[in-house]
Image (cartoon, grey):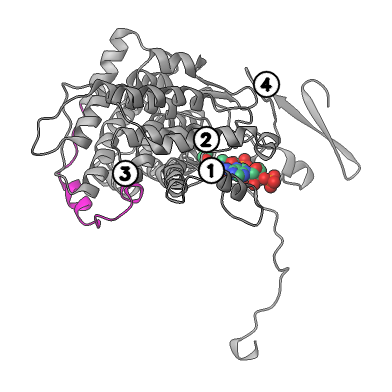
Amino acid sequence: MSDNKVILNYDGKAFEYPIIDSTLGEKGIDISKLRDQTGLITLDRGFKNTGSTISTITYLDGDKGELFYRGYPIEQIAEKSNFTEVMYLLLNGNLPTQAEYTNFENGIKKYNYIAEEMKKIIDVFPRSAHPMGVLSSLTSALTAFNPKAVNVAVKEDLDHAAEMMIAKFAHLCAWTYRKTQGLPLNHGDNSLNYVENFYRMAFRKPNEDFVMDKVVVDALDKLLILHADHEQNCSTSTVRMVGSAHTGLFASISAGVSALWGPLHGGANQAVIEMLEMIEKDGGDVAKYVAKAKDKNDSFRLMGFGHRVYKNFDPRARIIKKAADDILNALGIHDKALDIAMQLEKVALEDDYFVERKLYPNVDFYSGIIYRALGIPTEMFTVMFALGRLPGWISQWKEMRLLGDPIGRPRQVYQGYTPRDYVSIENR
Ligand code: COA
């Protein structure tokens, strides 16, 4: 290897592959000519070493435990910014001026309602349906009411599509919750900011005046900010992959919702609370569950521990842990689950198994505790994650389309049968 290229020796020949520079973190080996030149492909199950694109949106350093949105450290963003500003930042690359902020907020408010027919669609789901399944279906159904393809060559078209998606998605998230509770479905209120608007749409009771609780709004704002983007994670890569076929924005986001649903990804926040409740019901023996997690013959894992990229600590977990303490204090809540979470964290962090494997609490370990304190039901946690991740998904979709990335189409190493002749059924 020289400074700017890698040399591969194969089959008696040397092939050169250029190194693609980065502004931070790993550089990449550009292997786009590898197959043509050598007949080889790379095999990297789970894409642990594979860069799927070049991006300028989010940077995270898993070893140092750092996360930046468009260059701004997550700690500063979480403390000083708000979710609407973060959405603008991710989508547009820079923090907005006051005029740009107002314009963006008004752009979202323009779409702060949803087609009445959508109510009929949500009506047919059983009340017991998981909100993530409903959310994914409704997001896809939105396409039917907004059939015009986004012209990515026109900035205004892209801006409007993003603003529309942001406004409508908050309705869908609120409605999926209201559906589980049998509550009537609301449209938005333009006198409120984005997070207040969502909070009211989701939790307003038909028989009571709605009280806007600042502690709750601030907590939601922070949680949404912390989830807003996380570079090429499973759901984001899904959105980019689906969008790479020039599939529309809504349908691509719908696929992202489905990917996020999984317990190894966004579904982990629900799994964490279920695990804490299970440990509590079982007498609160934390050591027993740590032992189960370490046992190779037991499929149990400590949910909310470990991360594909963060191998030091998850910076979002640190912010959120403090927020969880503050919110529980402000709301005067004592949560047994939080006590168990703290004990689990302590035991695991001192245990060689977790230390050697660099398994630390991730963002989902604490987010569920906050959502629970805010009175949000467990099944809704991943929906809250989706609402937070939406601007990341849209920004990444937009970047992918503007970069003109080709359709995503990985290769495979085939180890199945070599060609054989068809045998008719009576001779098998
Ligand atoms: N509890 C117990 N052991 C765990 C663990 C957990 N939560 N997470 C990873 N490990 C162990 C694995 O068994 C493996 O051990 P081994 O080397 O002895 O075989 C080792 O740590 C590496 O795990 P691996 O699954 O290869 O790491 P990954 O990078 O592919 O997976 C996660 C990352 C997040 C999927 C994984 O840590 C996990 O399942 N965590 C729980 C779910 C979760 O919180 N997801 C939210 C992510 S934000």
Q: Is residue 118 left or right of residue 222?
A: left
x and y percentages locating residue 167 in the rendered image: 26, 31
Q: Earlier in the sequence, mark 4 or mark 1?
A: 4
* Residue extent of the magenta highlight: 110-135
Residue at the spot of label 4: 21
Marks 4/3: CA distance? 37 Å
Q: Earlier in the sequence, mark 1 or mark 2?
A: 1
Disc 1 vs disc 2: Cβ atoms closer than 8 Å?
yes
Marks 4/2: CA distance? 43 Å
Marks 4/1: CA distance? 46 Å
Marks 1/2: CA distance? 7 Å
Disc 4 vs disc 1: Cβ atoms closer than 8 Å?
no
Q: Earlier in the sequence, mark 1 or mark 3?
A: 3
For mark 1, does the 10 Å Cα neighbourhood hold few (<14), some (14 to 19), or many (20 or more) residues? many
Residue at the spot of label 3: 139
Marks 1/3: CA distance? 40 Å
Type of amino acid at the residue the image marks with label 1:
Val
Type of amino acid at the residue the image marks with label 2:
Gln
Disc 4 vs disc 2: Cβ atoms closer than 8 Å?
no
Q: Is mark 4 within 8 Å of ligand 1?
A: no
Residue at the spot of label 2: 343
Q: Secondary structure at mark 1?
A: helix
